[in-house]
Amino acid sequence: MKSEGLEPTRPLNEKEQIQEKANNFTTNETAAEPISKEKSLIVSMPLIELPIVAFFLAIAAGAMDGYAYFTTKTFATFQSGNIILSGYSIAADEMYKLLPAIISIASFALGSMVLAFMRDTIKSKNKLWTFTALSFEIIVLLVLVANSFHQLISDYHLAYILAFVAGFQGNAFHYINKMLYGNIAVTLNVQLAASYFAESIMKINSDKKKQLLKNCFDYFFILIGFAFGAFMAAIAAKHIGTYALIIPIFCLIGIFITGRVFLKKNPTANIDAN
């Protein structure tokens, strides 16, 4: 017998499922239980903005740039360098160096555009987009590693694809602790690390000084990750060639798995970057 006044329910989408879990999680919490600082951080800050995640994103970007520069003497992530190379090539009448730099810049811009289209499309469906973006990066890099078996892609074309991936990643993830940073280029990080350190020297209040020093450390942490990734990729490229790209692949897979496990254990957690 059909019930009167009841409408058929539609299946919940991904974000609605997460919200329902969050509501159940909140309901099951006892009223007397204080909210810890760590739990408050989990609720308020997207996972992808945590310093440790930003560190591994920086390693991935540094590895891509290190490999590209080692093999082609062009930059995959550092587009300021490619712009400088373009101007220098014209001034020094070394036009053969101009085209690779220009193509790398264009590839980077295309990657950024693709991310913007992908993110907006997924967000319009009220779904999480971070995992899709990470998966896309991982798949592209795996294809490049697979190229080692047949050598269908030249070093220059491979570097252009890495520039595309760098533009994609750079537009996707650029906040750490709700502060703007660069995970594919380091100039902004050097500037802000120095600025926060200088401000900490001027502050007498211990709490403000600690926060400024923490901000400085976060940016310095990113610089270490970027340099470490570039160092490892250059050494690896010298000995194992394209297999050096396994370094950023492992970093991105680690972030992906951590995000999934984190979301399952913390239904109130944010994942996507703001």
Image (cartoon, rainbow, N blue to C red):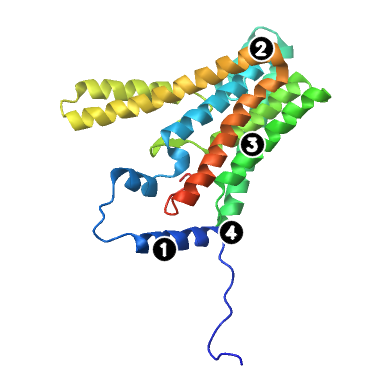
CA distance for labels 2 and 3: 31 Å
Q: Look at mark 3 in the image and give the residue it sits on.
A: 137
- The numbered mark at residue 24 is 1
CA distance for labels 3 and 1: 34 Å
In the displayed structure image, the side of residue 64 where residue 269 appears, left or right: left
Residue at 51% from the left image edge and 43% from the top image edge: 259
76 w.r.t. 124: above or below: above
Which quadrant does the N terminus fall into?
bottom right
CA distance for labels 2 and 1: 61 Å
Q: Look at mark 2 in the image and give the residue it sits on.
A: 89
Q: Are the residues at dot 3 and dot 4 in contact (C-beta closer than 8 Å)?
A: no
Which quadrant of the structure image shows residue 144?
Answer: top right
Going from the N terminus, do you reach mark 3 or mark 4 first?
A: 4
Residue 169 pos. (x, y %): 57, 35
Mark 1: amino acid: Asn
Which SS class for mark 2?
A: helix
Residue 205 pos. (x, y %): 16, 29
Going from the N terminus, do you reach mark 2 or mark 3 first?
A: 2
Going from the N terminus, do you reach mark 4 or mark 1 first?
A: 1
69 w.r.t. 37: above or below: above
Which quadrant of the structure image shows residue 156?
Answer: top right
Going from the N terminus, do you reach mark 3 or mark 1 first?
A: 1
